[in-house]
Amino acid sequence: MREYLSLSWWRRCCYRLYRHPIVLFGLGPAYLFILQQRLPVGMLRGGWQPWLSTMLTNLAVAAIVATLIWFVGIGPLLIVHLPTTLIACSVGVWLFYIQHQFDPTFWARDTEWTFHEAALYGSSHYHLPGILRWFTANIGMHHVHHLCSRIPYYRLPRALRDHPELRDVSRLTMLESFNCVRLALWDEGERRLISFREMRRARANDGAVRSVSAPPTKTIGSGE
């Protein structure tokens, strides 16, 4: 929260816009997966391998799209494939967001950070309905995945059955997850994620406390 308050007015506005749900789960995912991932501009120092891999993938995608247009036409492709792609992008970002930004979560500086605490309490157990667990390849059991990434996705339910003490660690239901959308800032004093509204309320309360605890000022008249 202190880092946010130390920003300029313009940068705070940009951050507020970036954290808006329409950008975070709508425009952002579309840009990330459809445009940014197709041009690895940020990997220029990695040599030619990232560019070659990405361009070959782009070529394969273009060939598939061209084949689909040849057989079904561009209209049906856009009506079916484009909305499906956009929804998949948003779902992917939503899952990643919920798995790492929830209340209560665990954030710590290097000197306080431990692997097991970060794995279990810094990533959520997103308890989804059975059909959604199947469609998302059990990725909601993210705390177990972070604890041991070598466990394949189809073994994650068994890991929870064999270790029931992990079931309620960082557990988050689908209904509870919608409340996480408002979380945008880390309050180091409270050690929890808070919303912009909570930040304003905390600043107002802090200002009121300072005004009450401030020593009274003595007014000196002109004759003294």
Image: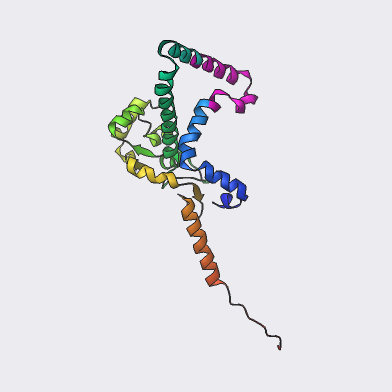
Q: Is residue 192 visible?
A: no
Q: Most prominent secondary structure in the magenta stretch?
A: helix
Q: How many marks?
A: 0
> In the image shown, does 188 or 43 lie closer to the viewer?
43
Residue 205: % across, % down: 49, 63
In the displayed orientation, state which residue is furthest to the front. 75
* Residue 158: quadrant of the picture: top left
Relative to 123, is 191 above or below?
below
Instruction: Indicate how the structure is coloured in the image.
Output: rainbow
> In the image shown, does 176 or 150 lie closer to the viewer?
176
Residue 67: % across, % down: 45, 11
Q: From which residue to which does the magenta span run?
A: 35-61
Is residue 214 rendered to the left or right of residue 140?
A: right
* Residue 146: quadrant of the picture: top left
In the displayed orientation, state which residue is furthest to the right. 223
> Was residue 191 drawn as part of the magenta stretch in this picture?
no
> Was residue 55 drawn as part of the magenta stretch in this picture?
yes
Q: Is residue 164 visible?
A: yes
Is residue 108 rendered to the left or right of residue 151?
A: right
Specify the quadrant that holds the C terminus. bottom right
Residue 20: % across, % down: 49, 43
Look at 53% across and 43% down and name the residue there.
Answer: 17
Residue 109: % across, % down: 54, 45
Relative to 211, is 222 above or below?
below
Relative to 190, is 220 above or below?
below
> In the image shown, does 135 or 76 lie closer to the viewer?
76
Look at 45% across and 34% down and name the residue there.
Answer: 93
